[in-house]
Image (cartoon, grey):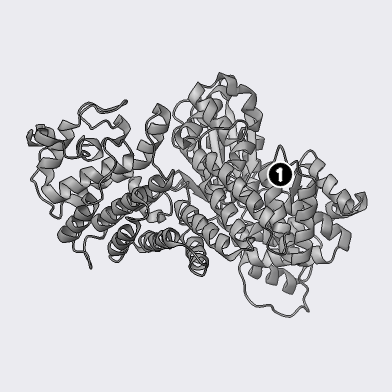
Amino acid sequence: MYPGRGLHGRRAECEVLDQVVADLSAGKPVVLVLRGEAGEGKSALLDYLAGQATDARLIRVTGVESEMELPYAGLHQFCVSMLDQTDSLPAPQRDALRVAFGLVEGTAPDRFLVGLAVLTLLSEAARGRPLVCLVDDVQWLDRASAQALAFVARRLVADPIALVFAQLEPSADDELLGLPELLVKGLDDRAARALLASAVPTLRDERVRERILAEARGNPLALLELPAELTSTEPERPAESRSGRVEQTYIRRVRALPVQTQQFLLLAAVEPVGDPTVLWSAAARLGLGEDAAVAAEGAGLITLGTRVSFAHPLVRSAVHRAAGRAQLRQAHRALAEVTDKRTDPDRRAWHLAAAAAAPDESLAGELERSAKRARARGGAAAAAAFLQRATELTPNLGRRGRRAVAAAQAALAAGVPDAADELIGIAEMADLDGLELARVERLRAELVFARSRGTDAPELLLEAARRLTPLDVPMARETFLEALLAAMFAGAGRLEPEHGMREVANAARSVPADPGSQDPVDLLLDGLAVQFTEGYAVGGADAAAGRGRGPGASQGHVGLPDVFVGRDGAVGGARLARPAGPARARRPRRRHAEPASDGPGLPRQLPPAGRRLRHRDRADRRGGRAQCRHPGRAAAVHADHVGGLAGRPARDREADRGGRPGRVPAR
């Protein structure tokens, strides 16, 4: 046992955390990710760290599964104790954070500014004394919050701040990959026996003891919970994961409780904030008294205080699984009735949607409005979830199809291709008009590319662009750009590299943009189309001819802000020009000169331009420049096409960061 803390077999891990405290006391910033299976003791190690850092200010938050669809819900929980300091933030950061938290209305906040705002708040909070921030169950944070906290973690360089996360093993969309890690594994046999003996000192049956040790396989939570379940005469059960075995234990414990106690636990499980006022109000709606709460707490499953908390996240999950659909709907309905429609309309709408047993147009419309608010706060995943549920609740088949198209588009932008596929299938069954059918064809092509980056996508996107041309020119041009970028990535297939890119470029040039357009999509598409059809030198000359157009232009770069310029100063900006008459003959500056060829080297050179399209769109909003006609579409999809974070495999992001994630050795 590690001295004074009751942590069996965790000496090496505690020494790492002791070093975190020592570094913090020396004024150094520290970032660490604790990874391990459910029940391995990550939360106990966070408790240990909180107990050791007695001289530091403490911020501790926990991800809640039922809040995953609410944008910035986790970040709001993280920042709530610092919100009184937002007035001191620089205006752009202050406004972005307030919009993200729904405190004021505004355009979708720039995630960069939201991250900077949190970083500034932490820096100010650590000015007087060191700051320890503990974030548990990161896997259940909403995506926007996880991205913001990962942004902050990568930029702690000077202040005495420790930011320590705990989460399950990494997944494909893990935002924390690349940060220093400490793997939390099961206890060795000696430590497991010591923990079991201290937890159940009356256990004398050797057969039961050995069976518990064998089934727990060193998992501390399993060692604590299984003794209540196993006897020497109980028949063997099918093998399952340790966390699954513990969860089943909790499910049986929940079902053994009185019905009213189960109802109270279910209310607490679906109320994501842990607000006792809301919980008691909902309990009163169901006629539940104090006895139900006392029994739940007495069973050791829940703690009632200034916040309502479960003994372990698996308890919350077990309560969900133990309940039937009717009971879940009843709990959500009670919570919706006590949630203020004016101050928290989105949470109320989500509870109402979960309580609905049949299609409801008014509720579907309310969810649509929630999706709009989520998108305005930068919550792409939340917007997709609201729209998907709105689609499910829409009774009219035609309107359902149109909502399915919007939901599929949002799901693709949020990097959820499986949900997008399902929604596209719903849309295809509806009676849609020509434009909506063309949008569905485009979404199907985008889905093919998002899933495989394969050779079929360029031709599918080109066909979709041609179909859109007589119906919606701006959308058609966006799709031409997607087809061109997809062809660059595919490199081979039914559209061959050189001929394929020329084919798309020629088709794009046949559908010109409005004269003088400064739309990012138009600038990028025209510049690439010129380059692929007339050669690099002409594209560079076009860039020189367009120098300085529009506010925020980089020196010599077609009116594009500096953030859009590539490392070589070319692809990200100077190549993006339309034919400009006689000036096209002007020789490009030497640093831009390359052979006028569409050869195999181009795919390696061009992706940075697309990768910066998302940033260009943000810069346009800040500078008051013209924006995309279809907000968010080009930014989200094109950034993904050229390797943006949405939906990218973890191995790709790892490679971007220079190799494998760092591991902190447990000595």
Position of residue 509 in the picture relative to residue 68 (left or right): left
Position of residue 394 in the picture relative to residue 293 (left or right): left
Q: Find numbered disc 1 in the image and state the secondary structure of the residue it sits on.
A: loop
Identified at 76% across, 49% down, the residue is 336
Q: Is residue 40 above or below residue 155?
A: below
Q: Is residue 303 above or below residue 331?
A: above
Identified at 49% across, 68% down, the residue is 425
Snapshot quadrant of residue 320: bottom right
x and y, in percent, of residue 614 in the image: 38, 41
* 165 vs 377, nearest the viewer: 377
Type of the residue with mark 1: Val
Position of residue 193 in the picture relative to residue 258 (left or right): left
* 451 vs 341, nearest the viewer: 341
Residue 525 visible in the shown view: yes
* 265 vs 391, nearest the viewer: 391
Q: How many marks?
A: 1
Snapshot quadrant of residue 341: top right
Mark 1 Cα-neighbour bin, 10 Å: few <14, some 14–19, many ≥20: many
x and y, in percent, of residue 12 in the image: 54, 47
Position of residue 512 in the picture relative to residue 590 (left or right): right
- Mark 1 — residue? 273
Residue 266 visible in the shown view: no
x and y, in percent, of residue 568 in the image: 20, 36
Identified at 52% across, 45% down, the residue is 33
